[in-house]
Image: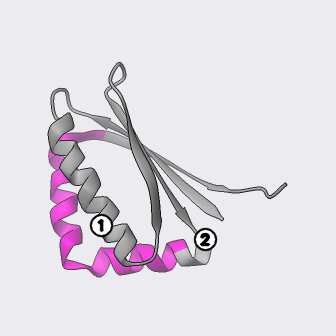
Amino acid sequence: MISRIRYAKIKSGVIEEYKKLASDWQTLVHKYGGEVVGFYYDQKKEEVIGIAEYESLEKLEKLQKNCETDKAFSNIQEQVKKLVVSVDEQILEKLDS
């Protein structure tokens, strides 16, 4: 299992708009077989942490390509430009115990 964790520093006062953006991301990721665990807002840092899971890195790469060619993707990217200051990402492999 692979987890993608994104840390998005958002502009001040845009959390309500970001909630819509998060919903659009979730819909797109689910459309192509990904699983969004959730979006978590740290009000003090004005940062949203999004966590999604994928069966494998190969599945993640395929999903990414599918999302990028979807007509909803360009609208999502435009919203990101309006609402987000910066993004950091980690891709982690789950260790089974």
Q: In this orientation, which residue lies closer to the viewer: 32 or 88?
A: 32
Membership of 57 in magenta stretch? no
Q: Mark 1 vs mark 2: which is more N-terminal?
A: 1
Q: Amino acid at mark 1?
A: Thr
Q: Residue furthest right?
A: 97
Q: Residue at x 30, y 67 (%)?
A: 27
Q: Which mark is residue 46?
A: none
Region rendered in magenta = 60-85
Q: Residue at x 26, y 56 (%)?
A: 23
Membership of 77 in magenta stretch? yes
Image side of residue 1 versus residue 65, left or right: right
- Residue ID for mark 2: 57
Q: How packed is label 2: few (under 14 Cα within 10 Å), some, or many (20 or more)?
A: some
Q: CA distance from mark 1 to mark 2?
A: 20 Å
Q: In the picture, residue 92 is in which quadrant?
A: bottom right
Query: In terms of secondary structure, what is the magenta stretch mainly?
Result: helix
Q: What secondary structure is found at the residue carrying circle 1?
A: helix
Image quadrant containing the C terminus: bottom right
Q: In this orientation, which residue lies closer to the viewer: 37 or 88?
A: 37
How many numbered marks have been drawn onto this rendered protein structure? Answer: 2
Q: Amino acid at mark 2?
A: Leu
Residue 25, placed above or below residue 14: below
Residue 56, placed above or below residue 41: below
Q: In this orientation, which residue lies closer to the viewer: 72 or 19?
A: 19
Q: What secondary structure is found at the residue carrying circle 2?
A: helix
Q: Which mark is residue 27?
A: 1
Residue 68, placed above or below residue 75: below
Q: Position of residue 82 (x, y in %)?
A: 14, 45
Image side of residue 88 versus residue 77, left or right: right
Q: In the picture, residue 25 is in which quadrant?
A: bottom left
Q: Position of residue 64 (x, y in %)?
A: 42, 73
